[in-house]
């Protein structure tokens, strides 16, 4: 367990950690591959009730509906190794925003920035809103009409389809807008951003773990690693 936490937190080479622990490198690798899936499968702690876990997006919506929690939704991406040349789907990992090979995830927090769920993992080229649509979030908003959420401009389609539940930043006025209209827009935009910024703080907590600053291992392990880190961060945040 300790070896796995050190690898996730500092992304030390297995050989270096094996030297510190006076064991063979294969022992560290085997331990990490045994413990990491268990951490990823734990789910996310419920604030104030750390013994309860949220494992699916449906769990999060049911919790939010029962407790009256307003959700914050945002996407995050992590740079990773470039797929080998001529491999099918290689371009799918090139992020249109960062112009790098990345993988994205969706993070959901409450109003205090406490992680409730992270998932919807996908290659960097896929849009944040498309990933959530694939996860069935449209259906969940219909099933839980009392659930509210704040999002950024990347989820305007979600806010358009659920105007009474999802709040996105207001659209910028046209070029011929009056100074008064621009001032009102700026004030509303700033207020919405201030109320939504806690999910950015939640993302920042995840990025304190070296493995989520830039993942240098095999891409097939990234989803598992992000889920494991998200669950560990939620354990600490649930106590706040």
Image: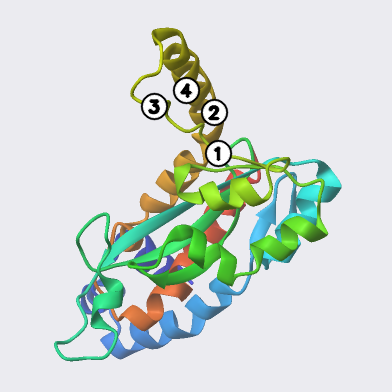
Q: Is residue 111 above or below residue 128?
A: above
Q: Is residue 118 left or right of residue 92?
A: right
Q: CA distance from mark 1 to mark 4?
A: 12 Å
Q: Quadrant of residue 78?
A: bottom left
Q: Are marks 3 and 1 in contact (CB under 8 Å)?
A: no
User: Residue 239: horizontal and vertical position, in percent?
Assistant: 65, 42
Task: Residue under label 3, please give it.
Answer: 174
Viewer-closest of 173 and 54: 173
- Report if the CB atoms under discs 4 and 2 are less than 8 Å apart: yes
Circles 1 and 4, Cβ within 8 Å, touching? The answer is no
Q: Is residue 186 positioned above or below 166 on the image?
A: above
Q: Which mark is residue 42?
A: none
- Rendered image: mark on residue 192: 2
Name the residue rendered at 45%, 73% in the picture.
223
At horizontal 47% and vertical 70% (from top left) the residue drawn is 121
Tell me the distance, in whole angstroms, between the alpha carbons under discs 3 and 2.
Answer: 20 Å
Expressed as whole percent of the image width and height from the top left, the position of residue 190 reads 47, 22
Q: Dot 3 lies on which element? A: loop
Q: Which residue is mark 4?
A: 190
* Residue occupying the far right of the picture: 66
Q: Residue at x 17, y 86 (%)?
A: 84
Residue 172 to residue 235: above or below? above
């Amino acid at each position: 367990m300790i070896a796995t936490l050190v690898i996730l937190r500092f992304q030390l080479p297995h050989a270096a950690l094996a030297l510190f622990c006076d064991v063979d490198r294969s022992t560290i690798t085997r331990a990490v591959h045994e413990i990491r899936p268990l951490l990823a499968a734990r789910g996310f702690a419920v604030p104030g009730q750390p013994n309860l876990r949220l494992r699916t997006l449906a769990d999060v919506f049911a919790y939010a509906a029962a407790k009256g929690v307003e959700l914050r939704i945002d996407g995050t991406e992590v740079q990773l190794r470039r797929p080998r040349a001529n491999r099918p789907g290689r371009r799918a990992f090139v992020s249109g925003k960062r112009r790098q090979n990345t993988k994205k995830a969706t993070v959901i927090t409450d109003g205090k920035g406490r992680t409730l769920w992270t998932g919807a993992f996908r290659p960097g080229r896929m849009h944040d809103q498309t990933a959530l649509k694939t996860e069935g979030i449209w259906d969940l908003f219909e099933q839980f009409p009392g659930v509210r959420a704040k999002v950024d401009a990347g989820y305007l389609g979600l806010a358009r389809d659920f105007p009474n539940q999802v709040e996105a930043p207001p659209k910028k006025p046209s070029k011929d807008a009056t100074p008064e209209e621009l001032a009102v827009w700026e004030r509303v935009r700033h207020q919405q951003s201030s109320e939504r910024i806690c999910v950015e703080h939640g993302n920042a907590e995840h990025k304190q773990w070296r493995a989520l600053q830039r993942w240098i291992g095999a891409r097939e392990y990234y989803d598992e690693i992000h889920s494991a880190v998200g669950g560990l961060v939620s354990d600490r945040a649930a106590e706040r």
